[in-house]
Image (cartoon, rainbow, N blue to C red):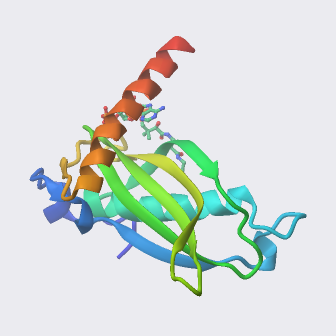
Amino acid sequence: MKNTDLIPEIANDMTPRKVKDSQTETHAIVHPDNTNALHNAFGGYLMGLMDVAACVVAFNHAGRKVNTISIDGVRFFRPATLGTILNIHASLNRAFNTSMEIGLKITETDPVNKQELPIAHGYFTFVAIGEDGRPTAVAPVEPDSDEARRRYEQALVRREARIALGKQLQ
Ligand SMILES: CC(C)(COP(=O)(O)OP(=O)(O)OC[C@H]1O[C@@H](n2cnc3c(N)ncnc32)[C@H](O)[C@@H]1OP(=O)(O)O)[C@@H](O)C(=O)NCCC(=O)NCCS
């Protein structure tokens, strides 16, 4: 499957879909060409990993081409040193009309107690692109857990803040 494919049975079906139907977890390893002068993963590399994982989620949900329109709330919590095995969690927080907010979290797993330690997080907004190259509607998402409901509610607050800030800075 390619992220340029159109999956008509998904793209044309506006029935609400569950968060778990599109979410993904991928992995990567910090190699020497991903590091900065401090020998830690550089931010652009981590953001690239998040963008790819978010694209997979948006494509899974929309069933058609998607484009990143904005990235915000990126925060780096601890350095990811050379050789670190990264877990990249990506989950659809909310679908609006043509846009979708995807929450991203990068962690590393403590090998002893198996606890996941936060490395970075962020919010990526994607837009579904129709045959005419313009934004097109996507199905709503149905939050299917308490955590998903919290993320769903907070996504609206962030969307309103983005819109308000955009207007204020015009
Ligand atoms: C994606 C693109 C086609 C959207 O077209 P547009 O005319 O700019 O967008 P619109 O004003 O119609 O808004 C589309 C959606 O984005 C949302 N949006 C607009 N600005 C936004 C922002 N700053 N943050 C989050 N969402 C935003 C709108 O609210 C709307 O969502 P909704 O339908 O769910 O309400 C166009 O902006 C584009 O091509 N951008 C470049 C994309 C790109 O190259 N990305 C990097 C590589 S993937």
Residue positioned 33% across, 55% down in the render: 92
Residue positioned 36% across, 62% down in the render: 57
Residue positioned 23% across, 47% down in the render: 138
129 or 25: nearer the viewer? 25
Q: Is residue 63 visible in the rendered structure shown here? A: no
Residue pushed farthest front?
Answer: 113
- Answer left or right for 161 relative to 99: right
Q: Quadrant of residue 161?
A: top left
Image coordinates of residue 79 in percent, x first then y, are 73, 64
Image coordinates of residue 101 in percent, x first then y, are 38, 46
- Answer left or right for 108 relative to 102: right
Q: Is residue 17 visible in the rendered structure shown here? A: yes
Q: Relative to 112, is 70 above or below?
A: above
Q: Quadrant of the C terminus?
A: top right
Q: Quadrant of residue 160?
A: top left
- Answer left or right for 153 relative to 162: left
**Total marks in image:** 0
Q: Relative to 117, is 135 above or below?
A: above
Ligand 1, by image quadrant, is top left
- Answer left or right for 78 relative to 74: right
Q: Quadrant of the N terminus?
A: bottom left
Image coordinates of residue 107 in percent, x first then y, are 56, 68
Q: Relative to 38, is 139 above or below?
A: above
153 or 123: nearer the viewer? 153
Residue pushed farthest bottom?
Answer: 112
Image coordinates of residue 36 in percent, x first then y, are 84, 64
